[in-house]
Amino acid sequence: MILIKEIYQEDYECCFKLDSITIGLWSKSQWKSEFKKKGVKVFALSLPRTIIGICVFHVVVDEAQINYFSILKDYRREGYGSHLMYFSIEKCKQLNLKKLSLEVSEANLAGNKFYEYFDFLTVGKRKNYYKNGVDALLKEKLI
């Protein structure tokens, strides 16, 4: 059974653990501080006893920025990421938000294809954004 629920400060370690074996974006202290930011929502997608995906978005006025989105590698390309994204978009609609945005590496072909499937449009680029010199694509979706 798939379950998606909002998680809170006390769950930062499980977020760090998933992140460290997927994209390695944040340190443990960064995860801990992310939960303290006003307007941040963190959702975990889980199967019985196992969190397999996390989405973090930050609500500011009438829009949200996805700051983190990842699914464990063994569960990718099986619809779990789509399930989490549909949930996130629906949550944004419930919050009466007008726009959802994110950044993704230009080199992340699978990620870019995934976001295009959900009608995210590329609206800008941050040159040499990542440590390896790859550009970040700025994507937006109107809700």
Image (cartoon, rainbow, N blue to C red):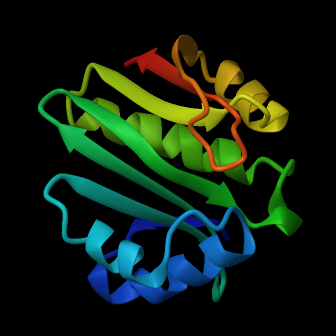
On screen, residue 113 versus residue 7, left or right, reads right
Vertical side of 85 occupied by 1: above or below: below
What residue is rendered at 33% in x and 79% in y? 32
Q: Quadrant of residue 137?
A: top right
What residue is rendered at 69% in x and 62% in y? 23
Residue closer to the observer: 30 or 49: 30
What residue is rendered at 28% in x and 81% in y? 9
Q: Quadrant of residue 7?
A: bottom left
Vertical side of 95 occupied by 56: above or below: below
User: In x, y percent, where is residue 50?
Assistant: 66, 83
User: In x, y percent, where is residue 57?
Assistant: 37, 48
User: In x, y percent, where is residue 77?
Assistant: 86, 48
User: In x, y percent, where is residue 88?
Assistant: 45, 43
Vertical side of 28 occupied by 99: above or below: above
Vertical side of 82 occupied by 22: above or below: below
On screen, residue 18 versus residue 79, left or right, reads left
On screen, residue 5 versus residue 79, left or right, reads left
Q: Quadrant of residue 142?
A: top left
Quadrant (top left, top right, bottom left, bottom right) of the C terminus: top left
Quadrant (top left, top right, bottom left, bottom right) of the N terminus: bottom right
Task: Give the tally of numbered discs.
Answer: 0
What residue is rendered at 47% in x and 88% in y? 13
